[in-house]
Amino acid sequence: MQDRHIRKIEELSMNAWPSYKIELFDKWLIRFSHQYTYRTNCVEQIGESSIPIPEKVRYCEQIYSEYNTPCSFKISPVVPNDFDEFLRDSGYDIRHVTNVMTMTLNGYKPVTDNNSIVTISDTITDDWITQLFTLNHTTNPVHLKIVPGMFKAIPKKTIVASVIKNGKMAASGLGILDRDDLGIYAIYTSENFRRLGYAYAICNAILERGISMGAGYSYLQVVKDNDSAVSLYQKLGFKYDYTYWFRSKNVGKEYNNE
């Protein structure tokens, strides 16, 4: 039962955040987005392999070598332990350990005084993306070019949230509704507006809108040891569910020439 639950959340998260390029190889998804995030630049398993694992890993390394980036594999509790051990023994390091937090929305009762400051829409606009880039310090020219298309390729209903101060976005958030499951993403607050409750208000507004749209369950991902974010999500009612990480190895030409 727990495996089925985790597989569902992993599926939801893949739907929620498309990659710039995806290749399906023997029930492995090879994802590439010029290193914008780990999740969109890794190999994810969606079924059992028919090709020997060492052969498949070599193929993935070849692909990422051609992209001139590290080769990364996402490791969740439903990925066999011996695969993680194989990668470890093959020189892959653990990177970007992330906790998944979840909660049921049955009986959710928000408490916030800042709801009125949150602007909500159902469309991801160019302006929202541009201001999000300012909040999360995205400056790479390639990312500025390709990531807007990734946001707009999200195939599910979206809840786009922001707090605007002095004509600029002070805080952001994105809800993605897939069936009756609501994922919370892109929670950022400007350094000049932290500790004012904006992130809480954003999350609360997304949850309220999601419930009105039929959401009965919510999930999110938070980098391990990000204590302030964990505290925020716990205050909302989220609880720890499981942990995933990435096994990564430098295989690009620039690393091979070092």
Image: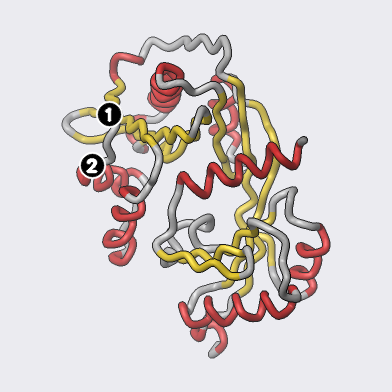
Residue bearing the label numbered 2: 125
- Whether residue 173 is situated above or below residue 249 in the rendered picture: above
* Disc 1 crowd, CA 10 A, few/some/many (<14, 14-19, 20+): few
User: Which amino acid lies under the numbered mark 2 shown in the image of this protein?
Assistant: Thr
Which residue, as the protein is rendered here, is positioned at the far bottom?
257
Find the distance from the CA under tag 1 to the CA under tag 2: 10 Å
- Rendered location of residue 151, percent (x, y): 34, 49
- Rendered location of residue 209, percent (x, y): 39, 20
- Rendered location of residue 170, percent (x, y): 30, 33
Q: Quadrant of residue 117?
A: top left
Any part of residue 197 in sight: no
- Whether residue 28 is situated above or below residue 240 in the rendered picture: below
Q: Residue at x 68, y 32 (%)?
A: 240
- Rendered location of residue 243, percent (x, y): 69, 44
The kind of secondary structure element at disc 2 is loop
Q: Residue at x 67, y 75 (%)?
A: 57
Q: Nearer the viewer, residue 33 or 52?
A: 52
- Whether residue 90 is situated above or below residue 160 in the rendered picture: below
Q: How many marks?
A: 2
Residue bearing the label numbered 1: 121
Check the picture and name the quadrant holding the N terminus.
Answer: top right
Q: Quadrant of residue 246?
A: bottom right
Are the residues tagged 1 and 2 within 8 Å (C-beta)?
A: yes
Any part of residue 194 in sight: yes
Q: Does residue 122 appear to the left or right of 16 in the view shown? A: left
Q: Residue at x 75, y 42 (%)?
A: 3
